[in-house]
Amino acid sequence: MISLKTKETSKLESLSLKELIETSVELSQVYLEGKDIEFQIENAEDIIIMADYEKLLGVIINLVKNATEAFNTEEMTDENSLRNDKYIKIKTDKDDNSALIYVSNNAEGTKEPEKIFNEGFSTKTTGSGLGLWICKKSIEEQMGELELSRSTEDYTEFSIRLGLGG
């Protein structure tokens, strides 16, 4: 059972990031059905990370779900809602001591990026404002960082930085 809402401490273990991303893509497909959004994956290298499998899976799926919903916001311009080149991309990479996961899309960015991780803040009329707040806490419990790395009128990117495994 994948759950973002548990308060259990994270169980860090050595994991294949490639396999985790493949699973998250499979489980996220349901959010893209009938929405004409291309799912782009750049996940070639098998990077071993230290993470809590279920919690990281939940975070990535939540970011993908939010990205699909960003294409349907009322504040989107007609031009953006009619575009037929919509995409969500998951890309993995690594530097000297961290694994990096980028989840991006070409929907309109948030108008209030400084509030996006605040508990209770939502841009959706039906949102609880807990999803991204819980995601950030979950990544921090895994000794990582979750950031909104870019948000413009036609591009949004979240980045996750986690420790490498052995």
Image: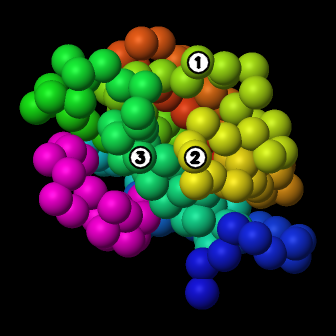
Helix or strand or loop: what does disc 2 sit on? loop
* Mark in front: 2 vs 1: 2
Q: Report which quarter residue 158 is drawn in.
A: top right
In the rendering, at what x and y percent does residue 75 appear?
43, 26
Q: Is residue 3 above or below residue 88?
A: below
Q: Report which quarter residue 124 is drawn in.
A: top right
Q: Residue shown at 48%/36% (left/top)?
A: 102
Range of residues picked out in magenta: 21-39
Q: Quadrant of the C terminus?
A: bottom right
Q: Residue shown at 42%/12% (left/top)?
A: 153
Q: Nearer the viewer, residue 153 or 17?
A: 153
Residue assigned mark 1: 111
Q: Nearer the viewer, residue 3 or 44?
A: 3
* Mark in front: 2 vs 3: 2
Do we see residue 100 in this rendering?
no
- Whichever of labels 2 and 1 marks the residue nearer the N terminus, that label is 1
Q: Is residue 136 left or right of residue 38?
A: right
Q: Report which quarter residue 25 is drawn in.
A: bottom left
Residue assigned mark 3: 69
Mark 1 belongs to which amino acid?
Lys
- Whichever of labels 2 and 3 marks the residue nearer the N terminus, that label is 3
Residue assigned mark 2: 125
Q: How many marks?
A: 3
